[in-house]
Amino acid sequence: MRLLQSRRLSLLLAVALLLFAVQLVFRLIFFFGFADFSDNEAATFGALAKAWGIGLRFDARLSILLTMPLLLLMVPRFHLLEKAWPQRIAVGYVLLVALLLTLFNVFDLGHYAYLGIRMDSTVVRFFDDIAISTSMIWESYPVVWITLGVIVLCMLVYRFGKGAISQIFSAPGEKLGKWAVTWRCFLVFMVAFWTSIGRLSDVPLRWNNAFFTGDPEIGALGLNSVLYFYETMDFSEARYDIAQVQAHYDTVAEYLGLSDSERNSERLNFLRRVEADKQAPFAGMERPPNIVFIMLESLGASRVSAYGNPLKTTPVLDDIADNGWFFEHFYVPVSGTAKTVWASITGLPDTSTVKTATRNPLIAHQRTIVNAFTDHEKYYFLGGSAGWANMRALIKASIDDLHLYEEGSYTEPRVDVWGISDLSLFREADKVLRDIPKEKPFFAIVQTAANHRPFTLPDDMGDFEPDRPDDETLYQAGFKSAEQYNAVRFLDYNVGEFFKMAKEGGYFDNTVFVFYGDHNNRITITPHMADFYEKLDLDGLHVPHMIYAPKLLPPKKVEDAVSLVDVLPTVAGLFGVPYEYAGLGRDYTKHPEGEERYVFTQTADKRHPVIGVISKDWMLRMQSSGDKAKLHKLYSEDSTADHSAANPGKAQHLQKLAKGLYESSHYLHYHNVEESAAGTGQ
C-alpha cells in the first residue's frame, strides 16, 4: 500500500480491503455451509464461478461505499493524520462498521437457513412479533456459539484494523508534487468508480444480474446481503391498479361464472349469490354434520406417502387419502402460513407485495363463507398466539361470533415458541368440542404449528417413537434432517390421536374433516415427485388436501387442479348453504366435466413475483408485469419448454387469466367486505 506513497490513500485502501475481507468470510460461510448445489443441474462450474464474480463485485462496491466517510479525515490542509484523535475515530469507525456487517450477515444466514432466500425488506414482518421471533431464534439456532463467533471476528478486525491504521498514521509523511498527487488520486478514483459500477458498462451491476441462470440458489450466491436488502427497501406498495382490473374484468368474470345480471365492468362487481341447494349431500339432514378444518403446518405434498414419499411418513393421512376425497393436484396460491390463513378464510390469494395481508389493518374485516354456516358454532384453535402476523384481527373481525382459543387458553404446558404441542392442541380442542351439546353442530379450525423450526418433540409424545434413518435415505426422500422427518411423522401421529379422541367424544361419525397444508418447508431433492414441481418452483405450493367423512362421503380421487381458495366454496356446496361471495374460489364439484380447470399461483419474491395459472397438465408462468410468459406442458419430457408457439390461443387466454386474477386479488383485498363487495370503482 505504501506504493501509493500517500498515507491518506493507503488508509482508504486498507480499510476497504479489511471490510472486503469481512464480507469474503461470510461469502465463504454461505457457500460451504448454507448453499447446497449437489443436485442442482444448473450449478455448473461456469455458473458458480460467474455467481462468485458477481457477488465479489457487489462486496467490493459495498466496501468502497462504507469507506467513503473516512474521506473527511483526508483534507490535506487540516493535517489530521498528525493528530491522535482522528486515528481513534478511524479505528472506532472500522470496528463499528465491521460489527454491523457481521451482525447483518449473521441474520442473513439465519434467514436463508429458515426460508431459503436472502434477507430482504420483508424481514420487518418479524419485528411485528418480536417476542415470538426472538424465541424462535433462540430455540432454533446456536445463539451462544454464534455470539462467540461474532465476538472473535470483531476482535480480529480490531486487531488487524488497529495495527494497519496505526502503522499508516505513524509512517513518515512524504512530500508529493501536484502531478504526483493528481495522478494517484485520479487512479484511485477511477478504480473505486468502476469497482462500484461493477462492470465496464453504462449500466451498473444490479441485483437482478445475480439471477442470470434463473436458478434462485445460484442467484442467492451472487447477491450481497446488505445491498440486496437496501434495494428492496425502496418499494412502496400500491393498493391496486384499477385500470388493469377493469381491463381483465370480463376474463375473470367468466372464470368465476358470474351471471349476466351479476356482471358489471364499470362498478367491478365480483359479488355472486349462490342459492341453497336442496340436492346437496348434506342438505336434507335434520342436524347437519360438524366441520373441522385442520391446517397442517409446513406440510408439502412431497412429504406425504400418499403423494409418493418413499419413507411411508404418514400412514394416518394415507388412510384418509384412501378413504376420503383425495386431491392430487392441490395448490396454495402463495406460500406462507399467514398467507394461507388469509386465503383459506377470504378466498383471495394474498398477493401483498411486502407484508402479509393479515398485517394490513385497513383490510382486516373480510367477507367469508364461514359465516354462511349459520347453524354451526364457530371455533378457532391454535397452540400459540393469534397475534402472530396480526391473524387475530382477520379471524375475529371476519368470522362472526367466533370462539378463539390460543396461548393462555389452555392447561397443557407450552413447549416452544409456537406454544403448546400439536398433540396438546388436539387434546385441548377435543375437550371443547366433545362438551358442545350434541344437537348443536360446530365449525372448528385447528391450526397446527409443530412441523416447523425448531421441530420440537415434546416430553409427552404419547406412544410415538422417533425414527432415525441414515442421512442419505433422508436426503433422497426430501428431508434435510431427522428432526424435520420426525416432525412430519409426529404431525401424522397427532391426527390419528385426534381421531381416537373424536370417536371417544362421540362426534367423529358426524364430522367432515378437511385437511390442507399451508406450504412446504425446505427440501433436498424429490425424485419421487414429477420433475416440474421443482423445475417450475411449485414444490412450495403443492400441498396435501383431503376431505374425510367415512360415514358420510364415499372415497373419491380428484385429479383436477384445485386451489386453497376453492375449499370453502366446495364445502359449502356439500352442505347446500346459500351464501354471497366476492372471493376468487369456486366449488370444484360444479366445474364442467371435460373442461380444463385452472387455478392461480404466485412464486418467487413478493416484489417481482412470478404469477401463473396451472391445471392438471398445463401451466402458464410469467412475470407479474406480463413479461416472459411461457406455456409449459407439465408431464412432457422437458417441462420447462415453452409451448406457446404451438398453442397461441391457449397461451394468450391464460396470460389474460393469470394477470386478471393477480390484479383482481389486489383489488378485492380492499373490496371483499360487506359494504363494498360489489365494488366501488374507486
Image (tube, helix red, strand yellow):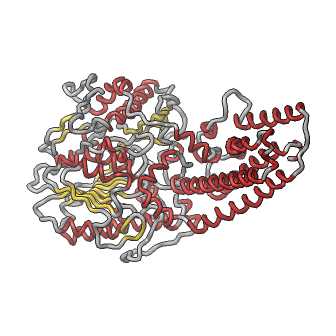
Residue at 63% over, 67% down: 148
- Closest to the observer, 659 or 135: 135
- Left or right: 11 with respect to 531? right
Q: Residue 593 at x, y = what percent? A: 29, 37
Residue displayed at 34% across by 64% down: 383
The image quadrant that residue 301 belongs to is bottom left
Residue 111 in picture, x, y percent from top left: 54, 54
* Nearer to the camera, 536 or 294: 294
> Front-most of 296 and 644?
296
**Picture quadrant of residue 369:** top left
Q: Nearer the viewer, residue 142 or 569?
A: 142
Q: Is residue 596 visible?
A: no
On the image, the x and y values in percent for residue 302 come to: 46, 55
Q: Is residue 246 above or below residue 543?
A: above
Horizontal relation, residue 344 to residue 489: left or right: left
Residue 189 in view in this figure: yes
- Image quarter of the C terminus: top left
Q: Residue at x 33, y 70 (%)?
A: 424
Q: Is residue 58 left or right of residue 466?
A: right
For this view, does 636 lie left or right of residue 29? left
Q: Image quarter for residue 223?
A: top right
Counting from the top left corner in percent of width and height, residue 473 is at: 55, 64
Q: Residue at x 54, y 64 (%)?
A: 141
- The tally of labels here is 0
